[in-house]
Amino acid sequence: MVLLKSEVVLKTGSKAPDFDLLGVDGKRHSLADYKSYGGLLVIFMCNHCPYVQSHLEAIKEIDQKFKGKVAVIGINSNDPTNYPDDSYDSMKKIAKEKGLRFDYLVDETQEVARRYGAVCTPDPFLFDKERKLIFHGRLDNAMKPEDTATEKTMIKNIEKFLLGQKIEKDFDPSIGCSIKWKEQT
């Protein structure tokens, strides 16, 4: 396991890169599917990473708390060749077992992760109504899988955004496993 901090590639104010990805629901999803939401939270995640596993309940809490206001989307960009737990079939199984109600999409080509500048799992990006980046960073302050969060960073930032208040820190790096990139040929 390679541990990485998220990096700034997509700068604050940048538009969310579009995508057309298959979800665990068997349907294709694109950015336009979420236009009715006031905000959009895109989280690069996977199944096998202990950092993601330890944050699943936090992600589900965000999804429930802001249902109808902020769309939550999970995107798995890992290469399942050496990580079969991150295969599309495993994604469907995990989504069902863990009760994930948000859209969980597979980025088979890894192009979406590259356009967003995602490097680790979880790597969350929060966009406003115009789909401009307003926050890139951690879900909470539990930086190791065994840590207990004492601050719900993403919830606090979404609440500020929905109230029209400024998010003081637009980048607060998350930490997690590296995205498992395909070998370049």
Image (spheres, rainbow, N blue to C red):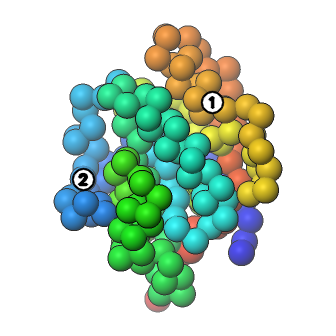
What's the distance in space between the residues labelled 2 and 1, CA to CA? 27 Å
Residue 40, position as x, y percentages in the image: 40, 35
Question: Under tag 2, what secondary structure?
Answer: strand
Instruction: Kindly identify which numbered label has been placed on residue 54.
Output: none
Q: Tag 2: residue type?
A: His
Query: Tag 1, which secondary structure?
Result: loop
Question: What's the amino acid at mark 1?
Answer: Asp
Q: Nearer the viewer, residue 128 or 51?
A: 51
Q: Is residue 108 left or right of residue 118?
A: left
Q: Earlier in the sequence, mark 2 or mark 1?
A: 2
Q: Is residue 57 among the parts visible in the rendering?
A: yes
Image coords of residue 55 (percent x, y): 62, 51
Instruction: Return the residue nearer the eye: 115 or 123.
Output: 123
Locate residue 156 relative to residue 15 in the image: left or right. right
Residue at position x 57%, y 47% from top?
57
Q: Position of residue 5 (x, y in %)?
A: 71, 54
Residue denoted by label 2: 29
The vertical placement of 39 against 28, above or below, is above
Report the residue marked by disc 1.
170
Q: Where residue 99 sits in the image (x, y, percent)?
A: 42, 54
For the N terminus, the image quarter is bottom right
Q: Is residue 120 visible?
A: no
Please tell me how crowded label 2 is: few (under 14), some (14-19), or many (20+) other residues with Cα within 10 Å: some
